[in-house]
Each structure stands twice: as C-alpha cells, then as structure tokens.
Image: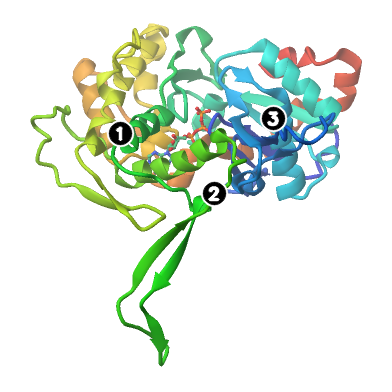
Amino acid sequence: MYGGDEVAALVLDIGSYLTKAGYAGDDSPRVVIPSMVGTINDPNSMELETPLTYAGDKMLMRRDYMRVEPALITPEYKWPLIECLIAESIGNELKLDTKEHPILLSEPSMHDRENRVKMTEILFEKFQVPALYIVKSAVLSSFASGRSTSLVLDSGGSITSAVPVHDGYVLQKSIVRFPIGGEYITDLLLKQLMGQVTIRPSYSFTKHMKSCYVEGGEIQGNIELTIEEKFFPNTDPTFHEFSIREIAKDIKESTFKVSDSPFSDSTFSNVPCVNYELPDGSVVEIGNERFKYPEIFFAGVEGMVGFTGIHQMVYDSITRCDMDIRRELYGNLVVTGGNSLFSGFTDRLQKKLTELTTQNMKVKLIAPQSSIERRFSSWIGGSILACLGSFQQMWLSKQEYDEHGAILVERKCP
Ligand SMILES: Nc1ncnc2c1ncn2[C@@H]1O[C@H](COP(=O)(O)OP(=O)(O)OP(=O)(O)O)[C@@H](O)[C@H]1O
C-alpha cells in the first residue's frame, strides 16, 4: 500500500483536444494546454538523437521547421508526444518533480488494456512517480456531479460517447461512441471560410496605423490600418493550419448555436448574419451555418453509418443496460464536454429525449451552468476522488509496480 499521502497528489487528464493538470483538492486544473506538440525537423541541421519538442505556450510560437501534431487521436497515442505533454504540464508549468507526487490519471472510458499498461510504464519508468491510479473519465465526471450511477454523455474534441456508470464502474458493453466532436464542426466552418476570405494568423502580418496623430492623449484624424504581410518560408504547413484553425474555433465557439427545432435551409434563410472581426481587422459574415453545422449532433452525419444523433446514442446505450437500472440512468444524465457549451445544446437534447422515451420515463439532465465544470468535469472528479481518505489505500505504488510489473494496473484500477 502507498504510504506517502502527506504529499499532494496531482490529477492529470490528457484529452484529444486539451490536457489538464493540477493539484487534487483544487476546484479546477491550474494548467490547461492544447494536446498538441511541435517538433522541429530542420533539414539543414544534423539529425538530433532526440528531436526538439515544444508544448503549451512554446508550441503556440512560430518556429522554423516546427511541425505541429496532436499527441492523441483516440485510440492512438503518440507516446513521445504524450511524454512531452506530461513534462510540460507538470515539470514546466506546475514546476513540480514527478518523483514526489502520486498521480491520478483520467483515461478514455472504453477499456484499452494496451494503452493503459504503456501509460503505467511511462509514468513509473520515465517520470518515476511514487504512486499512480487510473480512472475512466466517465466515472470521474459522474463523481464530479456527486453520483456513482449515471449515464455520462461526453461530447469532446474528436469523440462523443454515451457511457453508463453503475456504482462507480463503467458498463463497457453498453458504451455507444462515435468519432464525431467539435473538431468536425470546426472543419466544416474552415472549409467554408477558405472559399470566402483570406484568414491571416497573427504571426503572418504586422498592423500599421496611418493618418493619425496623438494630441493631448487623444487620437486625432482618421485611423487607417494597413497590413504588412510577413513571410516566413520555413514555416511548416501544419503550424499554419493550426493557427488558422484556432481562429475558426474562436468563430465557432463565439457565434454557433443549436436551434430549438430541426434546421433546414428554407426555414433558416432569414436568420441575421453575425459579423466576426479577424485578427487582421477584416470582417467575415457568419450566416445560417451558425445553426446548420451544430445541427449534426441531432440530425446525424451523412456517411457516418449508425450515427443518427446524440439523443439516439443515449437511448441506445441505456437500452443495452439491464432493465432495472434504466430509470435511474435516465434520471441522472450527466452532460459534459466542450460541445455541450453550444447555446441551446442541452435544451434540444432534453426535447429530443422526451420525444424518444415513453411518457412515464423521467429524463433529467445534469449539466452544470459553469463552463469550467462542463469542460473539466473528469478532472474535477479526479480532484475530489484523490482527496478522499478511503481512496488512499487504492494507489498502485512504485514498490508494487517494481514487484509485479505494469500489468498490475489491470487488477488495481478496474
Ligand atoms: N464554448 C464553447 N462552445 C462550443 N464549443 C466549445 C466551447 N468550448 C470548447 N468547445 C469545443 O469543445 C471541443 C473540446 O472539448 P473537450 O475540451 O471536452 O475535449 P477533450 O476532452 O480534450 O476531448 P475528447 O473528449 O475528445 O478527448 C473543441 O472542439 C472545442 O472547440
């Protein structure tokens, strides 16, 4: 048993979109960085044994020959990049030594023995953690809402899943998941914008103010902005795409909404356009695509066989569970993940589920108002769990790992 509980435990959640890290017991993660890593591939320099990698803020800065890529495309982990994210979030951002802190790690809800064993090896061997515990993200989201039984609907960057949790365990056979998430919506918008405007990321231009002067502390005359393009021929296309994507993401997050009735081009032809100012000062008009693209969560996606909406995912998942617990799951439907923050998302879900279920089945959505709780629910659940007195005996210690090997994680962390 691990006996070092006087040292603060850390909670780490590496999602496909964001990596979150911080102290157990805190209300929210102190570090939130993209789950993307930049790697320098300079054709002119001698091949380095370990290539230079950058994560967090360092990855957001343009560098010659820096290739930017996701560390995790569920279920595929790129281990050197995952190591870079762990080192950045705990070593550089929190400025802590991993040797001194037990780590509670959130993992995807679909059981994946190979990946969790590998993660265990990395954390004990490379990062020398004194103790580790791994918990499925849906279990943690359920705990964050104060429940040990619930149906967790999580719609994140690249995956949307409906996961039944019963008495703190995931019912694996009843999970329903599809590779659809917020990044798909960003892709649709990006494709449309590319044919409409030139998107210049901030690194690629300088703004100059002309025809104005300052007198008595006030700007006089007409302000005229001019853009001077900056050329960096050694910029890797992946960095340029990432930078443009960030702008599309911001447009999406600030202007898109889920409508309260099904979208069609004819009924939504008159919705007012919204103007969005791009970093270079030019303005782009966002029309009825504000409603059209998020509609896929309820109408399905052409070509994605079996996906006919998230309400159907919830229904199918609960239908695969034992009859005795279905009522409890419908009454404790935890809604989480970045996409649930689209305005109108939870109202439409409630409406669709009420239509789909029988009259005597009460559907109750548990969706906190705060966006922090919605985006970081599994991290918050981990923060609560790692502080419980009764949990301290659960840790998988370094000593146990040395004696039995990484496979012990399968027995200790169900
Ligand atoms: N306010 C918002 N409105 C709409 N979408 C949002 C908002 N905030 C974040 N998102 C979207 O949510 C997605 C990321 O969700 P989340 O942070 O839950 O991902 P993740 O947990 O890292 O990914 P996954 O669950 O796939 O591993 C992104 O596509 C992001 O653009």
Residues at marks 2 and 1, CA–CA distance in whole angstroms: 25 Å
Q: Is residue 375 left or right of residue 379?
A: left
Q: Badge 2: few (under 14), some or many (20 or more) residues near its Cα, within 10 Å?
A: few
The type of residue carrying mark 1 is Gln
Q: Nearer the viewer, mark 2 or mark 3?
A: 2
Describe residue 224's horizontal placement relative to residue 234 as left or right. left
Identify whether 173 is placed above or below 200. above
Q: Please say whether residue 385 is visible from this viewpoint.
A: no
Q: State the residue position of label 1.
A: 192
Image quadrant, ligand 1:
top left
Judged left or right of residue 230, residue 294 is: left
Q: Quadrant of the N terminus?
A: top right
* Marks 2 and 3 close (CB-CB < 8 Å): no
Q: Tell me where residue 200 appears, x and y as whole percent.
A: 43, 48
Query: Secondary structure beneath disc 2?
Result: loop
The image shows residue 267 at horizontal and vertical percentages of 9, 32
**Label 3: element kind:** helix
Q: Which three-letter amino acid code belongs to the residue tagged 2?
A: Phe
